[in-house]
Amino acid sequence: MTDPVLVAITGASGAIYGVETLRLLREIGHPAHLILSEVGRRTLEIETDISIDEVKALADQVHSNKDQAACVSSGSYRTKGMIIAPCSMKTLSGVANSYAENLVIRAADVTLKERRPLVLVLRETPYHSGHIELMRRASDAGAIIFPPMPAFYTRPTSIEDMVKQSVGRILDLLDIRHEKIERWDGPPK
């Protein structure tokens, strides 16, 4: 049995990163669990034409952000790792300070304590020194800080191309094998 990836969508701009992560996991047949924060839900409604039910249908299991007793709140429940995409600064602050006020942050804290990969897809910019300090603290605890930056060597022709390339790289960080993105193989000959 393959351990699932836990995907959380929080309230920063860039909800499409979480949606595309779920889509790619579904496409390659890798199980996924979803936690959708209250503000993440609102951001999805503002930024996309994708219904909440469609997003939930991409996951094998959906957990309420208020359910601190969900299976993913325990280290004994095995996961491949966790991706918070997008990760709001509020969520980053909770992760960096181990302030598990909701399931997203509790599951992230469990992911770190169990030494599993935790990828924080930070979307807000520019950063002030407080944001940078929180990123440093989260990184020191084991989180991977991943502001989604487009790779232009792939010559993207759409926003969708750029989002999918970032999502593919995020899955690489969890050592999930796929061939759904362009990989650098040196300059054209």
Image (cartoon, rainbow, N blue to C red):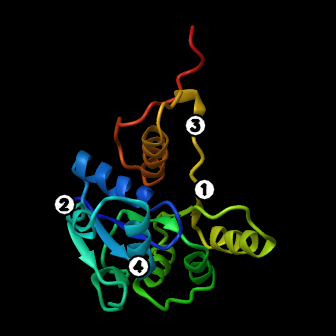
- The secondary element bearing badge 3 is classed as loop
Classify residue 33 by image quadrant. bottom left
| Residue at the extreme top | 189
User: Which amino acid does the dot numbered 1 rest on?
Assistant: Pro
How far apart marks 3 and 2 lie (CA) works out to: 34 Å
Residue 147: mark in rendering: 1
- The secondary element bearing badge 2 is classed as loop
- The secondary element bearing badge 4 is classed as loop
- What residue did someone put label 4 on? 37
Q: Earlier in the sequence, mark 3 or mark 2?
A: 2
How far apart marks 3 and 1 lie (CA) works out to: 12 Å
Instruction: Give the x, y percent position of residue 73.
Output: 36, 84
- What residue did someone put label 2 on? 1
Instruction: Give the x, y percent position of residue 6.
Output: 35, 68
User: Which amino acid does the dot numbered 3 rest on?
Assistant: Ala
- Label 2 crowd (10 A; few <14 / some 14-19 / many >=20): few
Quarter that holds the N terminus: bottom left
- Label 4 crowd (10 A; few <14 / some 14-19 / many >=20): many
- Label 3 crowd (10 A; few <14 / some 14-19 / many >=20): some
